[in-house]
Amino acid sequence: MNTDERKKQILNLLVSADEPISAKDLAARFNVSRQVIVQDMAVIRASHPDIISTNRGYVKNRQESSACMRELKLKHKPEQAAEELNIIVDLGGHVKNISVSHKIYGRISAELDISSRQDALEFTKALDGAASTVLSTVTGGYHYHLIEASSEKRLDMIEEALDKAGFLAPLTPWEKENGILL
């Protein structure tokens, strides 16, 4: 079983489980180390924020939400981060996180929680003059955002606006084939 198949099976188990499942139990079930499961869960949770970690294991949060989510692949220069974020929030989007898919380190994600121009401004001001830069610099500008909105129609509007601005990046054949966007 390859990594993507294992992650899909883990997600299916969590969706159907009534109780938390520990990393130790998942490791035994899939005959891998606990650390492999922890890494898998980091990737799964980047695209499924309703999967939460408890002291008893991983579980799907059963609270109903009317919000819709979509992960988009994007590319831009670091100095265009504010423009990208403003497009999303101006159309009613909430940027939940950023992820990059690094050839050596795998999937790396960071929570953002940006839902207004003020949030975007504070984020970009924190970068100004800092020794750090946006996460996407490690992948030549390519990155993924998990975006939440009130409807699929609103997510479509956001995706179209990002495409019109030249920020939407095409999926590679490998990404399409392996379902990189969870």
Image (spheres, grey):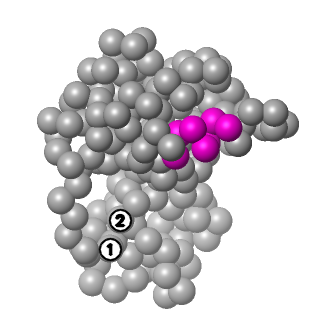
Q: Main secondary structure of the magenta part?
A: helix
Please, what is the three-letter code of the amino acid marked with disc 2?
Asp
Q: Residue at x 17, y 40 (%)?
A: 152
Per the rendering, the mark at residue 50 is 2
Q: Relative to residue 131, is residue 55 drawn left or right?
A: left
**How many labels, in total?**
2
Between the C-alphas of marks 2 and 1, the distance is 5 Å
Q: Relative to residue 17, is residue 103 drawn left or right?
A: right
Q: Point out residue 146 in the picture as x, y percentages from the top left corner.
A: 41, 44
Q: Point out residue 85 in the picture as x, y percentages from the top left corner.
A: 47, 33
Identify whether 31 is placed above or below 87.
below
Q: Residues within 10 Å of mark 2 (few under 14, many from 20)?
A: some
Q: Nearer the viewer, residue 55 or 164?
A: 164
Identify whether 28 is placed above or below 173.
below
- Res. 146 in view: no
Q: Point out residue 29 in the picture as x, y percentages from the top left corner.
A: 45, 73
Q: Nearer the viewer, residue 141 or 32?
A: 141
- SS under mark 2: loop
> Which quarter of the rendered picture does the C terminus lie within?
top left
- The range drawn in magenta is 119-125
- SS under mark 1: loop
Q: Nearer the viewer, residue 175 or 117?
A: 117
Please, what is the three-letter code of the amino acid marked with disc 1?
Asn
Residue 181 falls in which quadrant of the image? Answer: top left
Per the rendering, the mark at residue 158 is none
For marks 2 and 1, the one nearer the N-term is 2
Which residue occupies the extreme front position in the image?
118
Per the rendering, the mark at residue 61 is 1
Q: Are marks 2 and 1 in contact (CB under 8 Å)?
A: yes
Q: Point out residue 44 in the picture as x, y percentages from the top left corner.
A: 44, 55
